[in-house]
Amino acid sequence: MAIITFINNQKEETGKTLSLAAIVTYMSIEHNAKNLIVSTTNKEDRLKKCFWEERKKSKLNFGIFGPNTTNILEQENGIIGLSKIVKSNKISPEIITNYTRIVFKDRLEVLLGTQQNVRIEIEETYPDIISIANQYYDRVFVDLDENIDQKTKNAILNKSDVIVVCLNQRLSSIDNLKNQKEQQENAILKSPKTLLLIGRFDKYSKYNVKNITRYLKEKNQILTIPYDTLFFEAAEEAKVPDLFLKFKKSIDPEDRNAFFIEEIKRASENIIYRLQMLQASL
């Protein structure tokens, strides 16, 4: 059982959510383990776009059989419905799966966030939900929103076994992280459970993996999720699972998508290895 949390190093676009989606989808196909993604955002949910087509909203039908409850039930799914169970102290690890949406049966489920304005009321339940989920799922991946309450954010990070800090490839972002490390402003960056990852990575940039790793004085190579046209299109069309299943069947080493899969594999293996290393040291 393990909690892996993805966070941004600063408030800028890093491809954090899509990086998480790529890594967890790959892991769920390649490894026989039960994975859960927990979304903590109240914005447009990019995870939903990765896995499911948006349903058209239907009006409530007040007929002779009473109101159409389809929309009401959908609103109760995800974090809203689960937070109510937490507050009533009736939650158990097995109950969580009743509020998730399935991507791969017995392999990958997603607990979606909410787009409603009730964020303050439910934020405080995230740490408890994540801890309880960790008793049922082999791995719990948390997409930690940068706008979440700091107290809640700290509680989640303290519970995490591995923290993946995401940054972009711009020099200003890399310099910002380097300054934080040198001035010890961010304890997370000094933690042995932290890995660094660059999303939307361009391997042809002079800020390549070796140069950035050397510049930041990291012992281990920085992880990357390269920009891949097919993946980013699939992430808008609810076809991420289909894409990764297609890649698993066959991919030519000379294919332009091969580097994308190689780096996702490397990131996945590094996360698993870091978990094993930290658990062995306990």
Image (tube, rainbow, N blue to C red):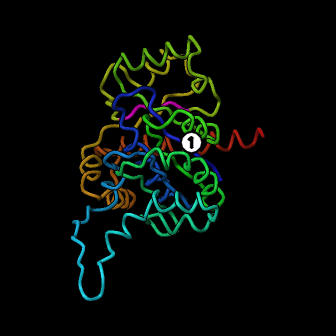
Placement of 125 over or under 106, stated as above or below: above
Where residue 278 appears, x then y in whole percent? 70, 39
User: Which residue is found at the position 56% from the left and 11% from the top?
Assistant: 182
Question: Is residue 203 or residue 234 the one in the foreground?
Answer: 234
| Label 1 secondary element | helix
User: Which residue is found at the position 55% from the left and 49% from the top?
Assistant: 126
Q: Quadrant of residue 67?
A: bottom left
User: Mark 1, residues whose alpha carbon is within 10 Å: few (<14), some, or many (≥20)?
Assistant: many
Q: Amino acid at mark 1?
A: Ile
> In the rendered view, does 61 fall on the left or right side of 83?
left
Examine the structure image and report whether residue 198 is included in the region drawn in magenta: yes
User: Which residue is found at the position 24% from the left and 56% from the top?
Assistant: 237
Q: Determine the residue located farthest toward the bottom in the rendered image.
A: 64
Q: Quadrant of the N terminus?
A: bottom right
Q: Quadrant of the C terminus?
A: top right
Specify the segment rendered in magenta: 195-199
Question: Is residue 88 or residue 107 the one in the foreground?
Answer: 88
> In the rendered view, does 146 fall on the left or right side of 186?
left
Label 1 belongs to which residue?
A: 271
Where residue 118 appears, x then y in whole percent? 41, 49
Where residue 50 appears, x then y in whole percent? 33, 54
User: Which residue is found at the position 47% from the left and 56% from the top?
Assistant: 79
Placement of 3 over or under 207, stated as above or below: below
Examine the structure image and report whether residue 127 is included in the region drawn in magenta: no
Placement of 87 over or under 3, stated as above or below: below
Where residue 163 appears, x then y in whole percent? 56, 37
Question: Is residue 104 or residue 212 the one in the foreground?
Answer: 104
Disc tally is 1
The prevailing secondary structure element of the residues shown in magenta is strand
